[in-house]
Amino acid sequence: MEEKIKQLKEMFTSKLSNIVDMNELNEIKVKAFGKKGEFTSLMKEMANITQEERKVLGKIINEAKQEVEEAVDFATKRIKDEIKKNRIKNETIDVSLPGRKISKGSMHPITKTMQELKEIVSEMGFDIVDGPEIEQVYYNFDALNIPKTHPSREKTDTFYITDDILLRTQTSPMQIRYMLEHKPPFRMVSLGKVYRPDYDISHTPMFHQIEGLMIGEDVSFSNFKAMLELIVKRIFGENRKVRFRPHFFPFTEPSAEMDVECAMCSGKGCRLCKNTGWLEILGSGMVNNKVLEAANIDPKKYQGFACGMGIERITMLKYGIDDLRAFYENDIRFLEQF
């Protein structure tokens, strides 16, 4: 058996010294040390010899096995070094070539506008809050003095989950929630996602709104008009024209809509502004007494104004974008411009 061990050792070390392929190396390792390998078989044969012979042969087998394992390690290193050497040789780098341009990410234009609005209203002392997107009909409509027969309650204008639960159509419900939890005077702003079943160049089923509310003893129409003009000038610049138009909202009285000069046509008329030269960006007005009463605020002592605007519409006007749907198409050519 000693002769057999010697022959196996010489056979494996000889093969390993000349091998150049990692697959062949793995095959040799299996033949030598696998479950049915040569050294495994030798260890099994030792069960048939005496204890004295087992001591002597066991030592010889372990020494031969160790030599073969060292030869395997050496061959493995040699083959890996050769592979690395060939790879480096074949991957010659031309240092004269221009470097690869690293793509740089940026904030989405909607996110940029939201952050800018947050900064402006924070400087004006408004508390920024957020609320549930899945809302109760009471907060979305009833508490805002919106009649049961109002068109905005129809399923064509609102995503209902149940008869009493819906996807909020505006961020106004947070104004009610805030008034119920805070005592005046206060200033608050709520912004976030809202949902309506619309889809065209100026509407999408999901969009973002920001709504503001100010309640106090000396709040007047002129207060909120001045504040809105200041916000708009901060966003669009001092030269952008604005105008107020009388309007009707169930939750404010008196009410007004604010228009901004269309950035696409500079007021001359285009498809975005429907050839009017103006784009409506917000609704506003003095808070209706019934809304104050629903929030347990005494309308004889306190007055307030509320306003709401679409963030997508503001972003379109700010950057001269003529199709609101572009914000959500994930076209890298569009997003790279910001």
Image (cartoon, helix red, strand yellow):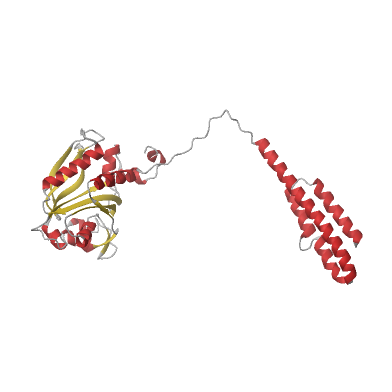
**From this viewpoint, is residue 272 visible?**
no
Whether 46 is drawn above or below 338: the answer is: below
Q: Residue at x 64, y 33 (%)?
A: 92
Q: Quadrant of residue 274?
A: top left
Image coordinates of residue 154 in percent, x first then y, are 22, 58
In the rendered image, the quadrant that contains the N terminus is bottom right
Q: Measured from the top left, where is residue 231 in percent x and y?
A: 22, 42
Image quarter hosting the C terminus: top left
Furthest-top residue in this view: 96
**Image location of residue 183, percent across then percent down:** 18, 60
Report the number of numbered marks.
Answer: 0
- In the depicted structure, whether residue 144 falls above or below residue 222: below
**Point 20% across, 62% down: residue:** 180
Q: Nearer the viewer, residue 236 or 332?
A: 236
> What's the residue at 80%, 63% (across, down)?
40
Residue drawn at the location 70% of the way across and 39% of the way down: 85
Can see residue 175? Answer: yes
Position in image of residue 311 (x %, y %): 27, 46
Left or right side of 113 for 297 = left
Looking at the image, residue 285 lies above or below residue 319: below
- Toward the viewer: 198 or 29? 29
